[in-house]
Image (tube, coloured by chain):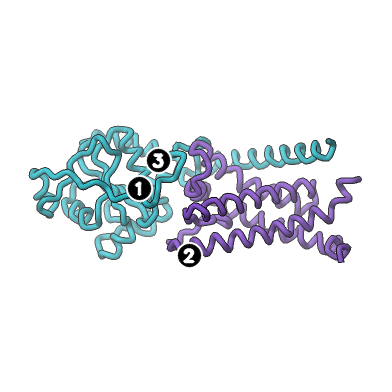
Chain colours: A cyan, B purple
Amino acid sequence: MTRRGSFWRDAIAILVIAGTAAAISNAIAGPERRLHWVGAYSEKAPDRAKPAAAPLAVTPANAAATGEPGKAFAPHPARAWVEVSGDDVAALFSRGDVLFLDARRSSVYREGHISGARSMSVWEADVDDKVKALFAEGRDQSAPIVVYCSGGDCEDSHMLGQKLYFVGFDNVLVYKDGFPDWQKRGLPVGKGEPR
Amino acid sequence: MSGRLTSPWLTSRVQFVLAAIFVVAGFSKIVDPPGFAHEIHNYALVPGPAVNAMALVLPWLEVVTGLALFFGIARRSSARILGLLLLTFIVALSINLVRGHFVDCACFGVSTAVKTDAERLRDMKLAIARDVGFLLLVGQVLAATRREERA
């Protein structure tokens, strides 16, 4: 009994010290390193073997704008996001009026991102403020927004898409192959501080 | 033979090695809590609301326990805590291995390298084997300090 009591007493003391140190380090950390104590994530990581997204709706009005006849990017209020290919994203980029959001960490964004994209890392403490601020800009909620991360099994862009959907954006397009695909295509890349 | 395996000379060195491993592992995660939270989330084992708290506290738990072991403070309890942590890591990796969900271990911080599933699979197996080895070290400390408990 005494031995067990001793272990639990030590364990609680160590846990209290660790918790206090964590609280202090989190309080003094910058926004890129800070975390909210309660995470706002779904309980299960999205299934990586997700089936391909449903075909995008086609509207003749904006089919021409994408540069690909028959392909359009109509709002999809019933779905948080739809996945789009690199060709779709390149066409959207060429329009010049489409917002691009980078869901990767700010440190990775600095090293290289889609030219003109804004940083909105889903893992950093200020992401919800950034999403709300974006909404507060009064943008057209049905205009396409392209979100991307590192491609492959990266789910950050889907998580950001979910957050954007919850505040009211209903045309979030997830660039499923992400920044590596963009680089492979040799499309414009920017570097520098998050914006 | 058993006397050699539990000698104070060996025990102090094993303690030092274990402490160094956990302090290094803890600090490598402390520098990037959001990255570590991301990796914990990828394991798909921790409830979403608890991911961040775990990402914040677990690395400090490793560091504090490692330092306690290094300085010989409550060393049996520290060794037990490290043993429990290692068992938890082994179980978490094994569950994901069994269900074919390949994750980055994030044992020593967050990796920015993009890995294939085959590379992740290999790394997970290596991490489990390494953690079993560390468990043996914990076992040595516990065996060598049994007398402390009796005292």
* Depicted A144 relative to depicted B28: above or below: above
Q: Secondary structure at mark 1?
A: helix
Viewer-nearest residue: A165 or A138: A165
- Where is residue A6 drawn, in percent x and y? 81, 39
- Where is residue B102 drawn, in percent x and y? 48, 56
Query: Residue B141 vs residue A153: left or right?
Result: right
* Depicted B124 relative to depicted A145: above or below: below
Identified by mark 2, the residue type is Glu
Q: Disc 3 marks which residue?
A: A127
Q: Which numbered mark, 3 or 1, is in the foreground of this view?
A: 1
Marks 1 and 2 share the same chain: no
Badge 2 crowding class, 10 Å Cα cut-off, few under 14, some 14 to 19, many 20 or more, is few
Q: Which numbered mark, 2 or 3, is in the foreground of this view?
A: 2
Query: Residue B73 vs residue A120: left or right?
Result: right
Q: Disc 2 marks which residue?
A: B119
* Depicted A187 relative to depicted A162: above or below: below
Identified by mark 3, the residue type is Val
Q: For the residues labelled 3 and 1, say whether their Cβ atoms are less than 8 Å apart.
A: no
Viewer-nearest residue: B94 or B119: B94
Viewer-nearest residue: B89 or A86: B89
Which numbered disc, 3 or 1, marks the residue that appears first in the sequence?
3
Q: Residue at image x 31%, y 53%?
A: A176
Marks 2 and 3 share the same chain: no
Chain of the residue where label 3 is placed in the rendered structure: A
Cα distance in 3D space between marks 2 and 3: 31 Å
Identified by mark 1, the residue type is Ser
Q: Disc 1 marks which residue?
A: A157
Residue A159: which quarter of the image? Answer: top left
Q: Is residue A136 visible?
A: no
Residue B53: which quarter of the image? Answer: top right
Q: From the image, which quarter does the C terminus of chain B lie in?
A: top right
Q: For the residues labelled 2 and 3, say whether their Cβ atoms are less than 8 Å apart.
A: no
